[in-house]
Image (cartoon, rainbow, N blue to C red):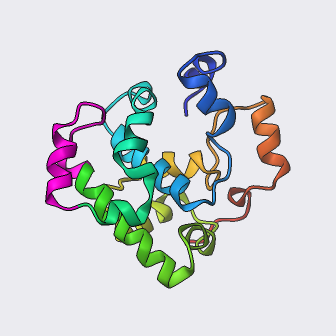
Amino acid sequence: MSAAYCRLAPGDPIHGPYDDTEDGFPAEEESVLFERLMLEINQAGLCWATILKKRAAFRSTYADFSVDRVDAFGPAEIERLLAGPGIIRHRLKIEAAIANARRVQALRQSHGSFALWLEAHHPRSPEAWAQLFRRTFRFSGGQIVGKFLISIECLPGSARSGLPGLLRILERSPPWRRAPRV
């Protein structure tokens, strides 16, 4: 997030709650990780406020970001999502959600969970993370990956310098403070 965003967020009814309690804090629960990745994918090309305003609709539409339920979506669900006004109606983003649900299921098999897969790859440079995500997930460019990883504390970047949120993050010795792998 930019310094301008962090000046905007405190007290803002849309940005404030997310900035104060989620952005830059660790996440391990599969549905939370999947949600954050899908929100970042859907934000591509749009304003973050748009995504936050539609967040409840995303949760409802994507079955509370249950990987197993989203994996079961077929052509009828894709058409339903494309017709629904509550979310971003972009075919590639919707198809990416379904494909990425399948990839998260595969990570369960290979690593035990999405969180353990992330942990197995700590620490990495932003460029190495982007390459890994491009090989693993759909619709996951460098900026999307960077914002996702910052949002779950895998990379530094939540511009809270001097704010209580950053101090709470630093107290936990986040994984990005380790030397990155090449």
Residue 149 higher or lower than 106, as above or below? above
Residue 113 higher or lower than 172, as above or below? below
Outermost residue toward the right?
A: 171
Residue nearer the viewer, 47 or 57? 57
Residue 146 higher or lower than 28, as above or below? above
The number of discs equals: 0
Name the quadrant containing residue 6: top right
Q: Residue 168 at what x, y percent from top left?
A: 81, 41
Whether residue 137 is visible here, answered yes or no, is: no
Residue nearer the viewer, 46 or 104? 104
Please state if 28 lies on the left or on the right of 57 as rendered.
right
Name the quadrant containing residue 24: top right
| Residue drawn at x 54%, y 61% as measured from the top left | 30
Whether residue 40 is visible here, answered yes or no, is: yes
81 in the magenta segment: yes
Q: Magenta stretch: dominant SS?
A: helix
Bounds of the magenta segment: 74-93
| Residue drawn at x 44%, y 35% as measured from the top left | 56
| Residue drawn at x 18%, y 52% as measured from the top left | 78
Please state if 10 lies on the left or on the right of 134 as rendered.
right
**Image quarter of the N terminus:** top right
| Residue drawn at x 36%, y 47% as measured from the top left | 41
Q: Residue 38 at what x, y percent from top left?
A: 40, 49
Q: Residue 109 at what x, y percent from top left?
A: 48, 83
Please state if 87 lies on the left or on the right of 125 as rendered.
left
**Image quarter of the C terminus:** bottom right
Residue nearer the viewer, 168 or 1? 168
Q: Residue 138 at what x, y percent from top left?
A: 31, 61
132 in the magenta segment: no
